[in-house]
Image (tube, coloured by chain):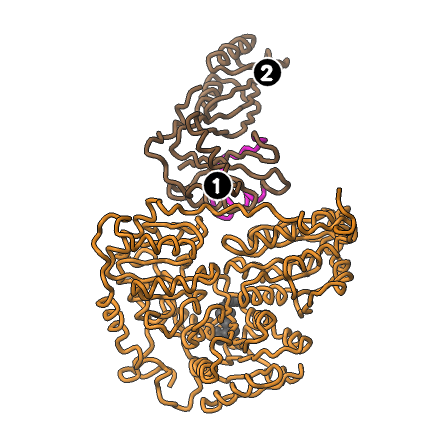
Chain colours: A orange, B brown
């Protein structure tokens, strides 16, 4: 028999919040409406802080930013119909980047389900392909188990978004609330690798035989919290580390073994190193087309070892020689003693040292430094690369690198951020990699700040993307939080313009974009700001923003027709990059 | 090539959509899909036959496994299995049909040869029921058509598959992976050396 006192009878709405509290939730991001009103009515009885966003897309991105910054599950709430559909872009963003969020939507009463009632939409149908899983609760007693299972699914294995759709009558009805009893069955273990498996043995043999290994460090390192294991692994075997966009921060950028970001806008030596490697150790990455270039010519001389938690990623894009399926941290911990056990793998000779290989890679850098805009004398132009570099230098000088989180939008500034902000610490970059969602930066920065109030949080966005979700400035003020905003304003949808320049004969169709005075816009929200047009003003203004008592916006008027280089054209091989111009030989086009 | 997957899934609303949607997303055409109860409460068994490149099998299996509603997936690939399909065929067999008065006795004979059963006799038609490998069913249909019988309706269940005896243990062991105290099996597993090519077309009762 259920003990009435230990297990109170609550409304579905109360059960929802009580379950969230039980799951450790302290902050949620949402927007009310008719079908979720019973839940909002009960909200204030619970120790949960609700951030009112200006758009449900913002709520989903904030939950996402919160999750990326903290590693905890983010929660977004919306009403039925348009509230639910507004979440879709945010859910898809989280799906493609494997971010654990739980979205809760109100739904019309179960009695009218399927009748096209006011604000009824089949949100579980709509989100089926962009969630890891979703649920519909039509009875109050289903709420606690579904929410609990949603949290478990979102956070375990390869993480991802989960949606729970709760009908209005389920929120209004009552049921006995028993948190413990609502626990889901133990998560079905992902099919784990066996330490004695032949695959492991082959992996170790490949390692022992390799003279030119490269680690491909992906987001999986962060998701599996394997940063220390990867660092130890790389150091012990002296293997250079190339990083994916979402892997930035997983391996310290200043480490002598750190090569930098690989792929479409990776530095030339990084991609050359991958192309010349004889062994690629892919750690929690998925060989996305942005990092491989043309598949037929990708790392042809390299054997490939793929350590990955999601078996469906194996051999999806790149055929690998060995697949070790499991949690990266566990796999590395299993592997470590076996590598050193001479009796384990067949005698392939002791492992080669990589001294020559590391020297070779250093030589690959060639004249890269000369070409780098960062090293050019100030010519009176303000380049986005300068701005990013100076934001990084400022944080470094202040000793705040480990406490600085950058949320970027999508476009050129995102790539410059990846190139010029040297991320030393995990979870310091929040960026939409898989879906490439413009409008992500500002709400994601808000979410990150809510998760890590001790950190300096920067939203770095282009003038285009910033305008997509700029309404969330008002959320910043309502919450009274300090988020720094850097708008990299080039008067163009810059990345689109760059592609039009490179592949469409400079036909700048619809890429010039008019913007409001962003400083005035911030001012209208009560947020101070400044215009920066010259390099020499950058650092002091950045310091002013960082040390300001409130949020602060800086509008950087940067070079209009600047390009992100190196760049690999679509369909080109990874090593066939267009490099930055060498100013000693060529004249930069925009001078 | 044709791939055959056996998937054990939760018996809940919306499960079929999730499975079907997966194939849609992968841009893989489902040739047939049968669902029904399994030996376990609350668990349905699906046999999914699809047309996809040879190397796609591992990924489809892994993707199926990723669905939260999936308990286990078996890919019959090259394993020895019994694959069966049920078919109902309604054939015109009245006095005015081409074979006239003889049509019925000819149909009885054909049914006999193909081990089909007559399950309905109506003044104008006969319904045959046949179970067997897909090729046998196609054989019967072909003979009917070539003998100028008018096939009025055909309803096929699609293939159902089950590994032959000696593999049952392994499948059961795989099922056991869902309980935390038994050791999980490695996945995806490579086909055993002793697995014979699937007798997809020739398989006899
Ligand atoms: C929601 C959305 N719409 C369109 C795009 C396509 N797109 C990618 S980058 C880009 C230009 C971004 O311009 P801006 O925000 O000014 O940043 P910049 O590239 O100039 O740094 C566009 C339109 C996208 N990624 N997301």
Image quadrant where one finds the C terminus of chain A:
bottom left
Element under label 2? strand
Residue A508 visible within the image: no
In the picture provided, is A79 more to the left or to the right than A518? right
Q: Is residue A232 above or below residue A156?
A: below
In the picture provided, is A259 more to the left or to the right than B35? left
Badge 1, how many Cα within 10 Å: few under 14, some, many 20+? few
Q: Is residue A87 above or below residue A451?
A: above
Q: Chain of mark 1?
A: B
Q: Which residue is mark 1?
A: B29
Which stretch is magenta?
B17-38
Q: Quadrant of residue A531?
A: bottom right
Which callout, 2 or 1, points at the residue further toward the start of the chain?
A: 1
Image quadrant where one finds the N terminus of chain A:
top right
The foreground one among A357 and A552 is A357
Please state the horizontal and vertical placement of residue B101, each as a whole percent of the image: 56, 8
In the picture provided, is B15 more to the left or to the right than A433? right
Q: Residue at x 59, y 31 (%)?
A: B37
Q: Chain of mark 2?
A: B
């Amino acid at each position: 028999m259920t003990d009435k006192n230990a297990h109170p009878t609550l409304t579905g709405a109360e059960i929802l919040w009580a379950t969230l509290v039980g799951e450790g939730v302290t902050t949620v991001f949402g927007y009310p409406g008719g079908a979720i009103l019973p839940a909002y009515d009960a909200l204030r009885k619970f120790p949960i802080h609700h951030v009112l966003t200006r758009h449900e897309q913002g709520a989903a991105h904030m939950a996402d930013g919160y999750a990326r910054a903290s590693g905890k599950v983010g929660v977004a709430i919306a009403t039925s119909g348009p509230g639910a559909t507004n979440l879709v872009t945010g859910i898809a963003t989280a799906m493609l980047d494997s971010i654990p969020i739980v979205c809760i939507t109100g739904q019309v009463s179960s009695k009218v389900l399927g009748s096209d009632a006011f604000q009824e939409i089949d949100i579980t149908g709509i989100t089926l392909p962009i969630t890891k899983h979703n649920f519909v609760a039509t009875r109050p007693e289903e709420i606690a188990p579904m929410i609990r299972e949603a949290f478990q699914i979102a956070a375990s294995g390869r993480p991802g978004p989960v949606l729970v759709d709760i009908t209005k009558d389920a929120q209004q009805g009552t049921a006995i609330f028993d948190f413990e009893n609502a626990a889901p069955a133990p998560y079905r273990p992902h099919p784990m690798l066996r330490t004695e498996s032949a695959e492991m043995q082959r992996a170790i043999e490949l390692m022992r035989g390799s003279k030119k290994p490269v680690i491909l460090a992906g987001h999986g390192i962060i998701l599996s919290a394997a940063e220390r294991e990867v660092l130890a692994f790389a150091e012990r075997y002296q293997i250079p580390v190339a990083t994916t966009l979402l892997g930035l921060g997983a391996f310290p950028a200043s480490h002598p073994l750190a090569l930098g970001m690989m792929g479409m806008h990776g530095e030339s030596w990084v991609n050359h190193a991958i192309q010349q490697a004889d062994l690629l150790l892919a750690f929690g990455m998925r060989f996305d087309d942005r990092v491989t270039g043309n598949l037929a010519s990708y790392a042809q001389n390299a054997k490939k070892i793929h350590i990955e938690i999601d078996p469906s990623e194996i051999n999806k894009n790149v055929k690998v020689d060995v697949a070790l399926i499991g949690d990266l941290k566990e796999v590395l911990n299993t592997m470590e003693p076996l590598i050193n056990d001479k009796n384990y793998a067949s005698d392939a000779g002791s492992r080669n040292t990589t001294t020559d290989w590391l020297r070779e890679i250093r030589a690959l850098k060639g004249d890269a430094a000369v070409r780098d805009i960062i090293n050019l004398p100030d010519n009176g132009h303000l380049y986005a690369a300068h701005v990013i570099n100076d934001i990084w230098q400022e944080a470094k000088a202040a000793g705040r690198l480990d406490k600085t989180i950058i949320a970027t939008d999508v476009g050129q500034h995102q790539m410059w951020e990846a190139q010029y902000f040297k991320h030393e610490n995990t979870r310091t970059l929040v960026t939409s990699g898989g879906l490439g969602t413009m409008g992500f930066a500002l709400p994601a920065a808000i979410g990150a700040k809510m998760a890590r109030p001790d950190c300096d949080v920067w939203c770095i966005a282009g003038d285009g993307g910033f305008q997509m979700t700029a309404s969330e400035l008002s959320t910043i003020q309502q919450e009274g939080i300090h988020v720094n905003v850097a708008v990299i304003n080039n008067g163009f949808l810059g990345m689109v313009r760059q592609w039009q320049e490179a592949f469409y004969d400079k036909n700048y169709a619809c890429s010039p974009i008019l913007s409001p005075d962003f400083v005035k816009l911030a001012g209208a929200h009560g947020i101070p700001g400044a215009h920066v047009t010259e390099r020499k003003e950058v650092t002091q203004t950045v310091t002013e923003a960082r040390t300001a008592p409130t949020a602060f916006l800086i509008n950087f008027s940067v070079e209009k027709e600047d390009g992100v280089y190196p760049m690999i054209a679509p369909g080109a091989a990874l090593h066939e990059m267009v490099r930055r111009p060498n100013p000693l030989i060529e004249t930069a086009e925009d001078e | 090539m044709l791939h055959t997957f056996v998937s054990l899934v939760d018996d809940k609303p919306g499960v079929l959509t999730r499975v079907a949607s997966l194939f849609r997303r992968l841009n893989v055409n489902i040739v047939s899909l049968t669902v029904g109860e399994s030996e376990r409460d609350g668990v349905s068994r699906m046999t999914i036959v699809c047309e996809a490149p040879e190397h796609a099998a591992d990924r489809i299996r892994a993707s199926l496994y990723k669905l939260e509603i999936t308990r286990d997936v078996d890919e019959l690939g090259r394993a020895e299995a019994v694959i069966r399909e049920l078919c109902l065929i309604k054939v015109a067999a009245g006095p005015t049909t081409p074979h006239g008065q003889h049509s019925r006795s000819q149909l009885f004979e054909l049914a006999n040869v193909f081990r089909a059963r007559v399950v309905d006799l109506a003044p104008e038609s006969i319904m045959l029921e046949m179970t067997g490998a897909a090729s046998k069913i196609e054989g019967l249909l072909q003979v009917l058509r070539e003998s100028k019988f008018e096939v009025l309706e055909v309803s096929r269940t699609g293939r159902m598959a089950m590994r032959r005896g000696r593999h049952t243990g392994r499948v059961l062991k795989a099922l056991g992976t869902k309980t935390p105290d038994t050791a999980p099996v490695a996945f995806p597993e490579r086909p055993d050396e002793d697995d014979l090519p699937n007798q997809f077309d020739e398989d006899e009762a």
